[in-house]
Image: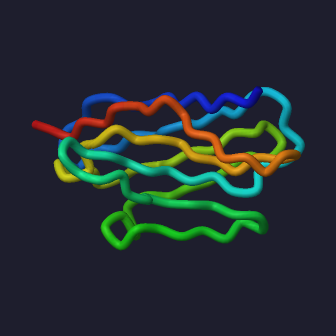
Amino acid sequence: QVQLVESGGGLVQPGGSLRLSCAASGSISSIYSMSWYRQAPGKQRELVAGIFSGGRTNYADSVKGRFTISRDNAKNTGSLQMNSLKPEDTAVYYCYAIIGPATRHYWGQGTQVTVSS
């Protein structure tokens, strides 16, 4: 069984920074992709950033230039560095990964990020 565990959420003032981490554990042969999604109250879950085999990345327009996604293949971990945070970034952030050998999809439990003065 594979598990994804997020950490690093919290309360931060506008303009501040947070770093989210996602650790994958279990029977893993490879992580094909790792992404971060977020869901604000009353809104649909949306893609924030993704990183794929070969290091290709993509970002939602709303976070480009402020957020940076990365991963450590050797440690089966990923991170989302969030800078210049805005109140509209407030949401529960979820780690999502496609993991082999079975090429299954996994979600973490989510971590709350609140941007407020």
Q: Quadrant of the N terminus?
A: top right
Q: Is residue 64 above or below residue 16?
A: below
Answer with left or right where residue 85 lies relative to residue 107.
Answer: left
Residue at (76% x, 56% y) in the render:
32
Answer with left or right where residue 86 lies relative to residue 28.
Answer: left
Tell me where residue 37 appears, x and y as whole percent. 44, 51
Tell me where residue 14 appears, x and y as whole percent. 18, 46
Q: Is residue 102 above or below residue 114?
A: below
Identify the coloring: rainbow
Going by the picture, which residue comes out furthest to the left? 117
Residue 49 or residue 2, whichever sits in front:
2
Residue at (18% x, 46% y) in the render:
42
Tell me where residue 2 appears, x and y as whole percent. 73, 30
Q: Quadrant of the C terminus?
A: top left
Answer with left or right where residue 40 lies relative to residue 49.
Answer: left
Residue at (79% x, 51% y) in the render:
103
Q: Is residue 7 above or below residue 44?
A: above
Answer with left or right where residue 51 lies relative to residue 43.
Answer: right
